[in-house]
Image (spheres, rainbow, N blue to C red):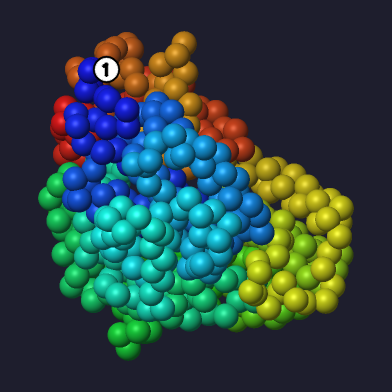
Amino acid sequence: MSGDDVVGGAVGGLKTYEVRTYGCQMNVHDSERLSGLLEGAGYVRAPEGTAEGDADIVVFNTCAVRENADNKLYGNLGRLAPMKAKRPGMQIAVGGCLAQKDRDTIVERAPWVDVVFGTHNIGKLPVLLERARVQEEAQVEIAESLEAFPSTLPTRRESAYAAWVSISVGCNNTCTFCIVPALRGKEKDRRPGDILAEIEALVAEGVSEITLLGQNVNAYGSDIGDREAFSKLLRACGNIEGLERVRFTSPHPRDFTDDVIAAMAETPNVMPQLHMPLQSGSDTVLKAMRRSYRQDRFLGIIEKVRAAMPDAALSTDIIVGFPGETDADFEQTLHVVREARFAQAFTFQYSKRPGTPAAEMDGQIPKAVVQERYERLVALQEEISWAENKKQVGRTVEVMVAEGEGRKDGATKRLSGRAPDNRLVHFNPALLAADGAEGEAEEPVRPGDMVTVEITYAAPHHLLAEGPAKAVRRTRAGDAWQKRQGA
């Protein structure tokens, strides 16, 4: 694109947009839909490197999970206020969980915002923007229940070779630390046929990896009256020709049943990877969190998964410093971490979520105590992650080449990608020739292609394959990526 094509915020005479995303994978996927909606309405994405405030439309897709979520939003809105004052045609929209929660408060605190929309009506964004422009006043529209399943909306997917596929929205759990059910509503499942049709369409476009998404993904079926619906869905994914990798996130231990473990183990394209949120290892704390499982149940699931898939990589979420957590409670969390031997753990210091029962509980833990426990947990998990990764040295794995994953080393020309168990691998794109010499692949390796490498070094958060690749398999997913680059 030449400089002549960009005038003010416009590209080629078309108005530009920017979507800023905060929070979970569900929000990331919602942002793909917001981008699709805006492009369907005639806007174009602001070019990479566009200065802050230069896009004609800025959309904040917000998260309400962390305590300082609103501070971050209003800080960002404050920075845009003077920029918007200089550009009267510029519009700002705020959506997502924080918008669903705060509603009119956003316009009261930031009257220069044009549109506020919620989690249930993201499809209204283009209409609300146009209404705000014509009426010259803020449009606040928050639906109390889902208007249409989001997957029916147009989507601008970020990747040509990997895609999110929502199988449900909402959550029926009542965890005392979580505000998501109040903001996204009760669980609503998609029909299996609709899900499989979307996956087949994606594969036809070149996608070779899909991640099934749900707020509580393995509870899928509760809304349609089939307790084994999720395992059936995994097995059905195994019958889709051209679909190489299937992942899912995030499951709940309460709903993790033996038929799901069997489906994972017996369906070749379902990857040997499981993200299972623990939150706490203490039965007392789990009860206070209103998590409907206990330590024995959690470790029992891990044991069954390892028996069925010995090489599976397990990851988790853990909250440190939940109200009332004692030293003994925290030691139970450390015990589970030692027993489970997670490849990776996403660890969080408890923070109050306004509107949740936990925010009003007695026994709020002093910050210094939470920090000390958090540091001990992180140190233990780092040690375990490194030890588990060292077990990968000497193994041969097929890596799906990724775009923008990890660092590209200019000196070594390393590329990066994910092994089947989702471990990050940096590798040498040179190819091992038949005579044992190192040579160049006939054509450049592309994101979406598959490269077979031998792991030579392990760090806590990545693996390294320093030798030349054993094989390179060019794929339709790589073709799709290459086609998108030329678009």
Q: Quadrant of residue 141?
A: bottom left
Residue at left offset 68%, top offset 43%: 382
Pointer 1: residues within 10 angstroms few (<14), some, or many (20+)?
Answer: few
Residue 373: give x, y in percent of width and height. 81, 54
Q: Quadrant of residue 280?
A: bottom right
Task: Decide if residue 381 is on the left or right side of residue 277.
Answer: right
Quadrant containing the C terminus in the rendered view = top left
Say above or below: 43 vs 252. above
Say above or below: 269 vs 251. above
Say above or below: 193 vs 11. below
Residue at left offset 65%, top offset 74%: 356
Viewer-nearest residue: 160 or 274: 160
Q: Quadrant of residue 27?
A: bottom left
Residue at left offset 22%, top offset 65%: 152
Task: Decide if residue 210 is on the left or right side of residue 308.
Answer: left
Viewer-nearest residue: 338 or 160: 160
Residue underneath mark 1 = 3
Residue 165 seen from this side:
no
Quadrant containing the N terminus in the rendered view = top left
Residue 202: give x, y in percent of width and height. 19, 53
- The amino acid beneath tag 1 is Gly
Residue 195: give x, y in percent of width and height. 23, 67
Residue 368 seen from this side:
yes
